Image (cartoon, grey):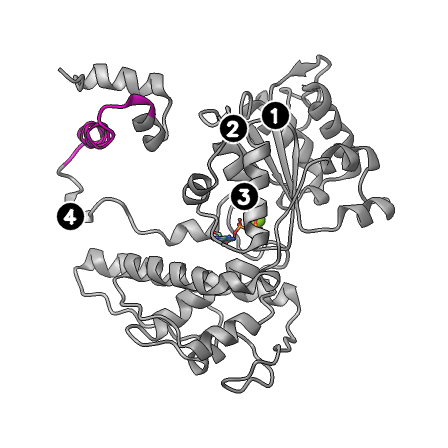
């Protein structure tokens, strides 16, 4: 059954009506149901990880694991034991036999983010496992097999890296057969009004703020900006400016502190010159995110203390956290920093009053009612396998009489 683009767009959350984004969605719809390896390219913050998730969720492997590995965050010395596992005693400290990410992804999908960062020796092994499904644990002599679909992503020009000898040509050719190029935001500015509208509404709802939109001059400014951090940066800017000016129509002046604009004057249609290098802007994004997390934490503390929340953000606060070279976030490699912003699903008031079982039973029952006892759709909505749902229906006595 062909995949419906509108449904794919709604479920994946990949926003955009531009030709470029629609093309990305078309390609996802075509290749997702197959087992073919995919290379997703694009600058940082363009939505590559969203694309990888959408591919998995629309494949026949959707009920099996999607294992995300940020290859750039794993030190070269341990990357093979992380990917393929190791045998007990294969090196000092290897006290147990360990499963690697490929084994963990068996029957599912592995997403190798920043694949351009993997060492050349590891690339040979990656090629082998993609082509034959075969691999060996570190320190082992027997070959094992897995059934894994590969989605890889990079923000590098892998063709150029291959010519420089930093990336193996055979692996590059193998990967690039199906390439999804996710466009930089500056290449589809016509999507910006839709994106800011959605990000503003979502953030306002989550944080109980009122959002009254941007003035047309502000939209013009947003469209002219370079967006070195792409959609990730746009989302952050919307959230910061809304936090600082809740309930107001958002103007270019309010944006001026958020995006470093040189020579901007309101109403100008001139493209904006941006002087910050991408690394620095990445660093600023991370810092801003850390600021949010810190604020969320203090909100939680205040909630516990029973005091009222008074949310104020000072964008000029001195950097609250030490910045480490390399891994600036200090978070685990696979943790998406943005997900930490989410509010709890359960009202803290209810804690202590309900058990997980009661919660699960109620939630399953309501889902079944919503989907008219259609088990396939209910299981999908709950994110569990149909047979798991079946078992739970029996266990909780939720069978439709
Ligand atoms: N087209 C899009 N529609 C909605 N949100 C997007 C889009 N592209 C990126 N984002 C958001 O931007 C952030 C970065 O996306 P991500 O997939 O992690 O980018 P990348 O892996 O390319 O760095 C996420 O919060 C994601 O939700
Ligand atoms: Mg990413």
Pointer 3 residue: 25
Q: Which residue is drawn at 58% across and 45% down?
A: 24
Choose the circle earlier in sequence order: 2 or 3: 3
Q: Ligand 1 closer than 8 Å to the CB at disc 4? A: no
Q: From mark 1 to mark 4, how far is it between C-alphas?
A: 46 Å
Question: Viewer-nearest of labels 3 and 4?
Answer: 3
Label 1: how many residues lie within 10 Å, few (<14), some (14-19) or many (20+)? some
Q: In which quarter of the image is the C terminus?
A: top left
Q: Is 382 left, or right, of 328 in this rendering? A: left
Pointer 2 residue: 59
Q: Residue at x 54, y 56 (%)?
A: 18
Q: Residue 214, relative to residue 375: is it above or below? A: below
Pointer 4 residue: 349
Asked whether residue 276 appears in the rendered view, the answer is yes
Pointer 1 residue: 35
Q: Magenta residues, as a range? A: 354-376
Label 3: how many residues lie within 10 Å, few (<14), some (14-19) or many (20+)? many
């Amino acid at each position: 059954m062909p995949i419906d683009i509108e449904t794919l767009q709604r479920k994946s959350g990949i926003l955009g009506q531009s030709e470029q984004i629609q093309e990305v969605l078309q390609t996802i719809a075509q290749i997702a149901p197959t087992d073919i390896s995919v290379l997703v390219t694009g600058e940082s913050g363009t939505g590559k990880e969203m694309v990888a998730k959408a591919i998995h969720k629309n494949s026949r492997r959707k009920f099996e694991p999607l294992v995300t590995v940020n290859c750039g965050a794993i030190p070269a010395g341990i990357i093979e034991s992380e990917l393929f596992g190791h045998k007990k005693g294969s090196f000092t400290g290897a006290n147990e036999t360990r499963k690697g990410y490929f084994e963990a992804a068996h029957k599912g999908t592995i997403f190798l983010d920043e694949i351009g960062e993997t060492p050349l020796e590891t690339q040979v092994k990656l090629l082998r496992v993609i082509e034959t499904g075969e691999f060996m644990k570190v320190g082992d002599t027997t070959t094992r097999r897995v059934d894994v679909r590969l989605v890889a992503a990079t923000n590098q020009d892998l063709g150029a890296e291959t010519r420089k000898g930093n990336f193996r040509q055979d692996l590059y050719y193998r990967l690039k057969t199906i390439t999804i190029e996710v466009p930089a935001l500056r290449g589809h500015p016509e999507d910006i009004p839709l994106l800011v509208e959605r990000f503003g509404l979502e953030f306002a709802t989550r944080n109980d703020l009122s959002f009254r939109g941007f003035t047309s001059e502000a939209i013009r400014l947003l469209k002219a900006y370079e967006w070195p951090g792409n959609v990730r940066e746009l989302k952050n800017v919307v959230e910061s400016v809304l936090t600082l000016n809740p309930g107001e129509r958002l103007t270019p002046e309010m944006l001026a502190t958020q995006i470093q604009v040189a020579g901007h004057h309101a109403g100008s249609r001139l493209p904006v010159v941006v002087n910050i290098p991408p690394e620095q802007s990445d660093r600023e994004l991370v810092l801003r995110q850390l600021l949010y997390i810190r604020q969320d934490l203090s909100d939680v503390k205040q909630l516990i203390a029973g005091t009222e929340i008074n949310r104020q953000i000072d964008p000029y606060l001195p950097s609250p956290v030490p910045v480490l070279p390399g891994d600036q976030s200090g978070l685990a490699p696979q943790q998406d920093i943005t997900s930490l912003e989410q509010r709890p699903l359960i009202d803290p008031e209810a804690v202590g009053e309900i058990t997980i079982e009661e919660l699960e039973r109620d939630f399953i029952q309501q889902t079944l009612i919503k989907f008219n006892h259609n088990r396939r759709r209910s299981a999908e909505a709950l994110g569990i396998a149909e047979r798991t749902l079946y078992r739970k229906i029996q266990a909780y006595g939720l069978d439709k009489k």
